[in-house]
Amino acid sequence: MGCCLRYLLLLMLSFPAVVSNGQVFTSVEMPDSIWHRMQGRSYPQGCEVPRSDLRYLELSYVDFEGHEHLGQMVCNRHIADDLLYIFRRLYEARYPIASMRLIDDYGADDARSMAANNTSCFCYRRVAGSTALSKHSRGMAVDVNPLYNPCVYVRSGRVLPPEGRAYAHGRDRRKDIPGKIDATDLCYRLFVSRGFRWGGSWRSLKDYQHFEK
């Protein structure tokens, strides 16, 4: 393969496609190209989730500037239809999503993905500060616009990602910020209507970006 073709393929994998011919909302069994891309990253050695449990989604979304894109997401097969429904409704409402790339584009580093305000689902990893596996490890949790909806540890005041501190506390959470998730927000209402739990309603930890099933 020539160097120019290699470069073009890398660009295609690294940036979300712009939607120009209508909306796209699809769920398929894991394609070989995506599966190989995940190895050693979101799907590390020793991952116990079978490939057959995962689905690859392509989802149209609108960014904060009103531009349309085609996003990518890997999730558990049990919530694939839920996510197709939710993200179609968000797209139709022009609800802003900053980015929707596979976390493998960030080396499966959750901190990097959150700091980039990237909406994502599957990543085989532990809960921060714990030995327990995250719901993301089974593809049963989604983080939406995580920079604007950070995870806040109530007692210590720790904020993840640290870059989201301006959106974490007090008046900043009460401001009318586009993409801010609260109990009146469309994103919240859609996820809850499909049986998801919202991390923003937890007591010792306020994970405003997080929805799990």
Image (cartoon, grey):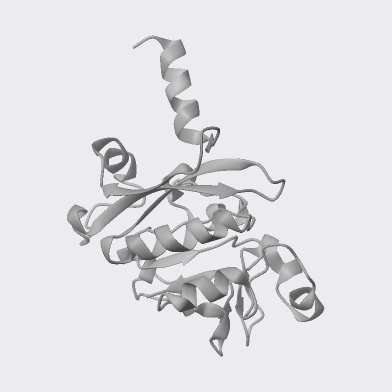
Res. 145 image quadrant:
bottom right
Q: Which residue is located at x 38 percent, y 9 percent?
A: 2
The answer to which of 201 and 163 lies nearer the viewer is 201
Residue 45, x across and y down, in percent: 24, 52
Q: Which quarter of the figure has residue 68?
A: top right
Q: Residue at x 55, y 49 (%)?
A: 61
* Picture coordinates of residue 202, whole percent (x, y): 53, 86
* Residue 65 seen from this side: yes
Q: In this view, does 193 lie above or below 68?
A: below
- Which of the two residues, 38 or 16, is positioned nearer the viewer here? 16
Judged from this view, the residue extending furthest toward the top is 2
188 with respect to 29 (left or right): right
- Foreground residue, 56 or 118? 56
Question: Residue 33 location, x and y as percent?
Answer: 29, 35
Side of 203 where 173 appears, left or right: right
Q: Is residue 158 above or below residue 68?
A: below
